[in-house]
Every structure is written in structure tokens, then in C-alpha cells.
Image (tube, grey):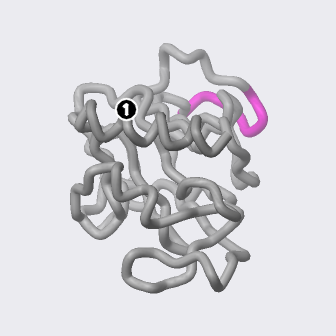
């Protein structure tokens, strides 16, 4: 299994893929190996599956205990579509191993939940509109034209402007 991880890291280095650490710095994912996330695995990231017309990095590293998503320039993950609220959602981390640190030395959360901050278009987890939910590896987080979608209802994928993959 360790060999598989090393091969994946090597492929990432060769392809030149980049990941955005939530400090407004672009970093080559080869540095992922230097900053470990959940209990010995690679750090937690949101991979960008769909970004509307906005150019986003391939992924965002989640290294903080609170990560904001919204239109506000101060948001950790800034989404520019008009249907996104200034503060649209928050990812809240908890737990963490004191031996697992960010490059700056801060502890890294080991579990996460997402909260909708009351935006009219909502936050969707695996296609279902939520107020808050625990995030699990492989979940998709969506933002789109969900004004008419009730909580716990499913949104058609074609209405989502942004889709992020939690891993």
C-alpha cells in the first residue's frame, strides 16, 4: 500500500499538478508527503470537479479548523458566481492528532462537518440540500441554482455550478 502511495505521489510530481493551501499560496502536491492529514494518510483536500466558468486550482487543502466558502474576498475558498453568498458555507474541523502538523506547525483536524450559512441557493452534499452534515471521504459538495430545492431534497446535477470532492 505504501508503494501505491509513493507511485501516486510520483505521478503527481511528474504531471505538475498543484494544490492550493488555504494560505493563498500555490504549492506543488509533492509537498503533500511533508504534511500528513488524517492518521497517517495524505491531508484532507477538496478536489474541484466542476467550477462553472471560474478558473480554480485542481484542489484545496483543508488545514484549518474553520474553512469558509463564499463570494467574499476574505473567504478561504472564493467562488465568484453571483448565486454564492458572501459567506455561503463553512467546513468545521475537529479532533486531530497533536503529532500531525501543518507546514506552519499547527495541528490538523481529523474529522469535518459542513454547515450551510443561510444562502438562498443552498449547500448540497451528495446532491441533497443540507443545513449541516458530517463529511466523509468521497462526498461531493455542490453549490448551484437550488433556490427552489427544499432541505433534504435532491438537486439535478445540471443545476450545480460548483462541485467539490471531499477526500
19 displayed left or right of 122 = left
Q: Nearer the viewer, residue 1 or 158?
A: 1
Q: State the SS at label 1.
A: helix
Q: Residues within 10 Å of mark 1 (few under 14, many from 20)?
A: few
Q: Residue drawn 58% across and 35% down?
A: 4
Tell me if residue 166 comes above or below residue 140 in the rendering: below
Q: Quadrant of residue 12?
A: top left
Observer able to see residue 60: yes
Query: Which SS type dominates the magenta stretch?
Result: loop
Let me know if residue 56 is in the magenta part: no
Q: Residue at x 68, y 67 (%)?
A: 110
Label 1 sits on residue:
11
Q: Which residues are magenta?
A: 147-153
User: For this rendering, which residue is in front, 149 or 40?
Assistant: 40
- Give the percent coordinates (x, y) of residue 30: 34, 51
| Spot occupied by residue 59 in the image (x, y as percentages of width and height) | 39, 44
Q: Give above or below for 126 relative to 33.
A: above
The residue positioned 53% from the left and 72% from the top of the image is 66
The C terminus appears in which quarter of the rendering?
top right
Image quadrant containing the N terminus: top right
Pick whichever, 16 or 24, lies toward us.
16
Q: Quadrant of residue 112?
A: bottom right
Amino acid at each position: 500500500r505504501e508503494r501505491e502511495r509513493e507511485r501516486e505521489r510520483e505521478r503527481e510530481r511528474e504531471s505538475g499538478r498543484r494544490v492550493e493551501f488555504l494560505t493563498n499560496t500555490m504549492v506543488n502536491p509533492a509537498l503533500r508527503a511533508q504534511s500528513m492529514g488524517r492518521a497517517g494518510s495524505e491531508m484532507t483536500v477538496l478536489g474541484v470537479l466542476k467550477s462553472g466558468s471560474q478558473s480554480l486550482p485542481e484542489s484545496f487543502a483543508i488545514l484549518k479548523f474553520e474553512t469558509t466558502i463564499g463570494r467574499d474576498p476574505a473567504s478561504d475558498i472564493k467562488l465568484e458566481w453571483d448565486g454564492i453568498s458572501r459567506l455561503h458555507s463553512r467546513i468545521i474541523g475537529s479532533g486531530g492528532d497533536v503529532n500531525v502538523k501543518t507546514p506552519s506547525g499547527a495541528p490538523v483536524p481529523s474529522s469535518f462537518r459542513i454547515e450551510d450559512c443561510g444562502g438562498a441557493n443552498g449547500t448540497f452534499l451528495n446532491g441533497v440540500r443540507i443545513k449541516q452534515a458530517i463529511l466523509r471521504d468521497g462526498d461531493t459538495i455542490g453549490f448551484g441554482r437550488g433556490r427552489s430545492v427544499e432541505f433534504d431534497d435532491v438537486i439535478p446535477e445540471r443545476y450545480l455550478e460548483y462541485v467539490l470532492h471531499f477526500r
